[in-house]
Image (spheres, helix red, strand yellow):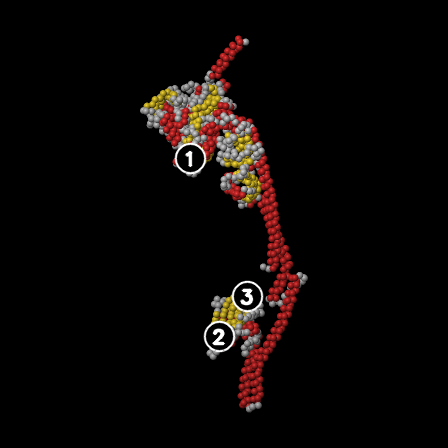
């Protein structure tokens, strides 16, 4: 990833995170505000229910008082205070008065607590009223919650008790209204709210005990839906405190409802939990608002990101353009173009960096030129030294031979002739030697360009081994074992077989010279990263690090009669094939020359002409 | 002053006596309006698919007649049969028919028609005509054949090709709208003499409340009165008349008790029922608590059966059975007292540790039923209870009260039936309906009733 792309990614990420943070912040604030509004609305609804509860209770009290004061009850109380009158004649009175006064529950109970007449369970006459002992018939006694057993179930109702004191034996009138669908329907709730009632009976949650309004929101016809109330009901039953929870009606969160469960307690010392009021608020408006915020955030975020990418691209391009120029210039320098320069205008850090780069490359170029001049001088000096050395050796015999001829001139002719012939041979031999020396220098200066063709390196290595096999095992000298370690799956490469053969032959000759006491010569081929690796290793005396550094320098030799051109020729051949050669050696442990050649001609063409020589010590 | 006063007093007395005599003199004409709760779908007396009731019997006997009739003491009297005699030890009965009796369509009554009618009503009987007589041959000694023939379901019916039945009774059918209304007209050629009433319009399927209102508004002259309303109706000044307690209210189990445990539970239920409080409150004093199938006035031994509640023993019996069995107790939803009885029985049962769930459903473990006893004759009444409750008729080995008791005891021992009450059939009549009183068995006998002038 480029610096520009990184910069672009950083800018975009920064914008995205900023937008996301803002969206989250807005969402959180919205949720908090909605929760507050929801709590306020629920509290208002609960308060309304309590007011409605009190109003209904007051209405129940009023109706029960009216019934108690009615002529029928007064007449009944009067008659029942007569010892001879039984109560069977009033069996249906509760039912008729309950219908008249619109009470769901109405019972007349005698002074002993036995039911005279019951509207809600007519057949229960004569049975004791179970709640008789805990009831108060005080005129100030408000309405209270009570679970009333009826024929086939138990109902929750709002009750009031009053007494008719006509004679010595009062008649108690217990009336009430059922907390049922109609009661809940009477509660005025907002359009997206509703109130349900759970009648707390038994040990476990039962869907049959949940009462919903007769009209209004979606009825809970599916028992599985009703069962979703079980956790919050159980929680209230266990804690006996108000609880809240969200009920998920479907996979769509908009259908969720937040329910507040308010315990409804009855009279008595223990204040038993008789019912649980469930006030539900639809989460639809909240979810839709949240979705709107999310969609807006996504839209704004997406737009911001696109804008940020565009702006970041522009900004990154401005910032990174000179850095990229620096990088390109550095690559050119790396590639050998030491004349690379960058624009150093401006006064910021990048401009300072560009100026430093320009100065650095200029300094490097100067140093290189100085180094080249120094090396050129050194090379000329070495060449002169070698030439002097090479030429001095044959010149000395020539001088001696000519001096012998001069001295022989003064001798008799026979002796002179013999000396002359002898000197002439010597002169010719030395002159031939001089010509050979000059020829080798001439040959080095005229190294031919490789004629590339498909070459199997293993074949060349085998040919070289075969060529020198006789010399390696020549009698009179310590034997040198020749080993071939070839990669059989080596593919052909584009190379000049004669030049490669010559280079390898030079390396074998060097190896033989390095092993005057015998040893082992190993010729090895291998593959590595699309290249052919050729190794020529000996077990000879080895080279010092200084020798390794200079061993490829023309005319440098470690041998007494060497020209110093053998390895230079090898390096020249390898370089002309786009490869490179290196040497690994330690004194006393032998030397290994490693040649790396590219496999195909395409690679060969793009390789720079200058060869790279890496040298390292084992 | 004295001379003037005495003659005036005498004249006034004579005028009053004359007016009174004029009021009690039978008058022909008028249409009697009757309302009733039962809603029969057919008028065929032998249709056993219809629920038996006093009202249905009375409808039948307005149109059809039996060979014999019984009086309040159970004695047999000639009707369509003038005489009868038994032979072969009560195994062969011969009934000689009254002559010159005609069906409403003008067809003369013959022995063949009468035999065919009886065969249709009693497929197991061997009945055939022999001259002007109908002969019934039984496989065993059966002294109750005359009593059986007095039952309304054994009325002589001539079935016409169009399917409409024709009878020989004092009234013939003018219009019949099943389960809605029946209009009858006096049969001019009735062998017993033309009825006083010209016509009778009977509205069926009317509940007690509607009947009471109809009587109050003058739209009905004769209505039924619910047992619990009898006391109230009397207080309100209605002309209320009741039969003897002829209707058995009972708990009827849908199946036999198959295990000893179930028998214990049923006995516990029977012991837990508070008949006295139910009668005094729910029935407002009407009827009689009934621990037996036959009422005491009929059998004479009803007091032998314990009617009191024995809750400790009921609990003891209940505790002998492990587990809780919940029975459903059903009632006729159109019968208000049946529901209250069912609920009260369920309450009583709960006190004994039993669980009964009242429900107005046809399929139930136990049901509150009303069984109109077939006749005032206890033998015939008991014999007909068995088939009604799904059991074979009890075998009565003799004609003594002990034999009758044994047969009833064996029927009760099945634990299929728990008697609760015996209720009378009670009617309220308008003040203009004269010479009418229901029989001890709840029969109407409207052939002799008449209406005062203002109703004509």
Q: Which picture quadrant has residue A567?
A: bottom right
Cα–Cα gap, marks 2 and 3: 39 Å
Extreme-bottom residue of the structure: A412
Dot 3: chain letter: A
Could you tell me which secondary element the residue under label 2 belongs to?
strand
Q: Where residue A182 appears, x then y in whole percent?
A: 55, 35
Local crowd size for mark 3, using a 10 Å CA cut-off: few (<14), some (14–19), many (≥20): few
Dot 1: chain letter: B
Which residue is identified by label 2? A519
Left or right for B386, reference A478: left
Does residue B152 appear in this view?
no
- Disc number for residue B106: none
Left or right for B358, reference A17: left
Which residue is identified by label 1? B316
Q: Earlier in the sequence, mark 2 or mark 3?
A: 2
Could you tell me which secondary element the residue under label 3 belongs to?
helix
Q: Where residue A119 appears, x then y in whole percent?
A: 51, 31
Q: Are marks 1 and 3 on the same chain?
A: no
């Amino acid at each position: 990833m480029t610096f520009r792309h990184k910069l672009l990614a950083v800018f975009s990420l920064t914008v995205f995170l900023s937008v996301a943070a803002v969206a989250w912040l807005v969402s959180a604030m919205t949720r908090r505000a909605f929760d507050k509004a929801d709590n306020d609305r629920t509290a208002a609804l609960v308060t309304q229910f309590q007011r409605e509860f009190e109003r209904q209770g007051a209405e129940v009290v009023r109706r029960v008082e009216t019934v108690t004061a009615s002529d029928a009850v007064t007449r009944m109380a009067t008659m029942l205070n007569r010892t001879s009158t039984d109560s069977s004649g009033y069996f249906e009175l509760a039912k008729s008065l309950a219908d008249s006064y619109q009470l769901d529950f109405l019972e007349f109970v005698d002074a002993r607590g036995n039911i005279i007449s019951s509207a809600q369970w007519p057949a229960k006459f004569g049975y004791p009223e179970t709640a008789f002992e805990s009831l108060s018939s005080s005129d100030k006694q408000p309405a209270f919650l009570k679970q009333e057993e009826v024929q086939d179930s138990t109902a929750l109702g709002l009750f009031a008790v009053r007494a008719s004191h006509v004679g010595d034996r009062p008649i108690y009138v217990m009336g009430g209204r059922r907390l049922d669908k109609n009661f809940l329907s009477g509660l005025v709730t907002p359009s997206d709210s509703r109130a349900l009632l759970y009648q707390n009976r038994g040990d476990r949650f039962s869907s049959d005990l949940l009462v919903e309004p007769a009209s209004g929101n979606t009825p809970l016809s599916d028992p599985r839906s009703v069962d979703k109330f079980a956790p919050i009901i159980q929680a209230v039953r266990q804690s006996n405190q108000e609880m809240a929870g969200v009920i998920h009606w479907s996979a769509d969160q908009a259908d969720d409802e937040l329910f507040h469960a308010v315990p409804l307690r009855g009279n008595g010392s223990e204040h038993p939990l008789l019912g649980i009021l469930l006030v539900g608020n639809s989460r639809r408006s909240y979810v839709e608002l949240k979705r709107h915020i999310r969609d807006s955030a996504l839209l704004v975020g997406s737009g911001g990101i696109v804008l940020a990418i565009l702006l970041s691209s522009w900004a990154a391009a401005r910032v990174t353009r000179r850095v990229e120029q620096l990088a390109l210039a550095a690559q050119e320098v790396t590639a050998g173009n030491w004349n690379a320069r960058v624009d150093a205008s401006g006064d910021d850090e990048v401009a300072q960096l560009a100026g430093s780069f320009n100065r650095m490359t200029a300094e490097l170029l100067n140093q290189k030129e100085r180094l080249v001049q120094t090396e050129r001088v050194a090379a000329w000096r070495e060449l002169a030294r070698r030439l002097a050395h090479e030429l001095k050796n044959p010149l000395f015999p020539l001088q001696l031979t000519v001096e012998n001829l001069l001295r022989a001139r003064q001798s008799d002719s026979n002796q002179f002739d013999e000396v002359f012939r002898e000197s002439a041979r010597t002169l010719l031999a030395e002159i031939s030697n001089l010509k050979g020396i000059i020829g080798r220098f001439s040959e080095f200066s005229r190294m031919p360009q490789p004629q590339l063709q498909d070459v199997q390196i293993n074949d060349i290595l085998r040919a070289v081994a075969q060529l020198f096999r006789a010399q390696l095992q020549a009698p009179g000298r310590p034997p040198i074992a020749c080993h071939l370690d070839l990669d059989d799956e080596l593919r052909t490469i584009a190379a000049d077989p004669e030049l490669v053969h010559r280079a390898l032959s030079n390396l074998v000759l060097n190896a033989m010279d390095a092993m005057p006491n015998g040893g082992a010569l190993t010729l090895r081929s291998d593959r590595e990263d699309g290249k052919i690796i050729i190794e020529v290793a000996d077990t000879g005396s080895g080279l010092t690090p200084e020798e390794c550094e200079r061993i490829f320098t023309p005319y440098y030799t470690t041998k007494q009669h060497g020209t110093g051109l053998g390895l230079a020729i090898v390096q020249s051949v390898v370089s002309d094939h786009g490869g490179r050669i290196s040497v690994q050696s330690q004194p006393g442990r032998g030397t290994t020359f490693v040649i790396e050649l590219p496999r195909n001609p395409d690679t060969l063409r793009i390789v720079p002409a200058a060869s790279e020589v890496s040298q390292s010590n084992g | 002053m004295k001379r003037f006063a005495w003659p005036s007093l005498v004249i006034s007395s004579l005028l009053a006596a004359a007016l009174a005599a004029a009021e009690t003199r039978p008058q022909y004409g008028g249409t009697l309006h009757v309302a009733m709760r039962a809603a029969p779908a057919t008028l065929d007396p032998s249709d056993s698919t219809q629920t038996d009731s006093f009202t249905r019997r009375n409808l039948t006997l307005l149109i059809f007649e039996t060979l014999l009739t019984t009086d309040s003491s159970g004695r047999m009297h000639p009707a369509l049969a003038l005489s009868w005699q038994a032979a072969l030890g009560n195994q062969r009965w011969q009934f000689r028919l009254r002559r010159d009796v005609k069906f409403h369509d003008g067809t003369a009554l013959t022995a063949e028609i009468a035999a065919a009618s009886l065969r249709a009503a009693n497929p197991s009987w061997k009945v055939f005509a022999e001259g002007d007589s109908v002969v019934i041959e039984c496989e065993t000694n059966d002294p109750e054949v005359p009593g059986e023939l007095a039952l309304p379901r054994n009325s002589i019916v001539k079935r016409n090709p169009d399917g409409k039945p024709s009878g020989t009774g004092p009234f013939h059918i003018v219009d019949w709208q099943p389960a809605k209304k029946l209009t009858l007209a006096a049969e001019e050629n009735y062998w017993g003499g033309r009825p006083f009433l010209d016509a009778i319009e009977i509205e069926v399927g009317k509940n007690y409340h509607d009947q009471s209102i109809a009587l109050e508004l003058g739209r009905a002259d004769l209505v039924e009165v619910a047992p619990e309303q009898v006391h109230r109706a009397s207080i309100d000044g209605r002309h209320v008349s009741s039969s003897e307690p002829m209707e058995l209210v009972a708990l009827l189990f849908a199946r036999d008790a198959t295990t000893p445990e179930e028998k214990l539970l049923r006995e516990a239920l029977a012991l837990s029922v508070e008949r006295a409080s139910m009668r005094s409150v729910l029935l407002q004093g009407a009827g009689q608590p009934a621990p037996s199938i036959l009422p005491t006035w009929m059998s004479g031994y009803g007091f032998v059966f314990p009617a009191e509640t024995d809750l400790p023993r009921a609990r003891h019996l209940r505790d002998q059975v492990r587990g809780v069995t919940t029975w459903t107790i059903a009632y006729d939803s159109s019968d208000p007292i049946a529901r209250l009885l069912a609920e009260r029985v369920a309450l009583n049962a709960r006190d004994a540790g039993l669980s009964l769930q009242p429900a107005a459903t046809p399929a139930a473990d136990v049901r509150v039923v009303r069984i109109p006893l077939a006749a005032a004759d206890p033998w015939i009444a008991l014999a007909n209870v068995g088939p009604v409750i799904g059991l074979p008729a009890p075998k009565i080995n003799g004609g003594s009260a002990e034999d009758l008791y044994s047969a009833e005891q064996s029927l009760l021992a099945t634990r299929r039936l728990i008697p609760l009450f015996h209720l009378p059939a009670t009617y309220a009549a308008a003040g203009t309906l004269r010479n009418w009183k229901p029989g001890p068995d709840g029969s109407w006998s409207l052939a002799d009733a008449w209406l005062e002038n203002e109703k004509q």
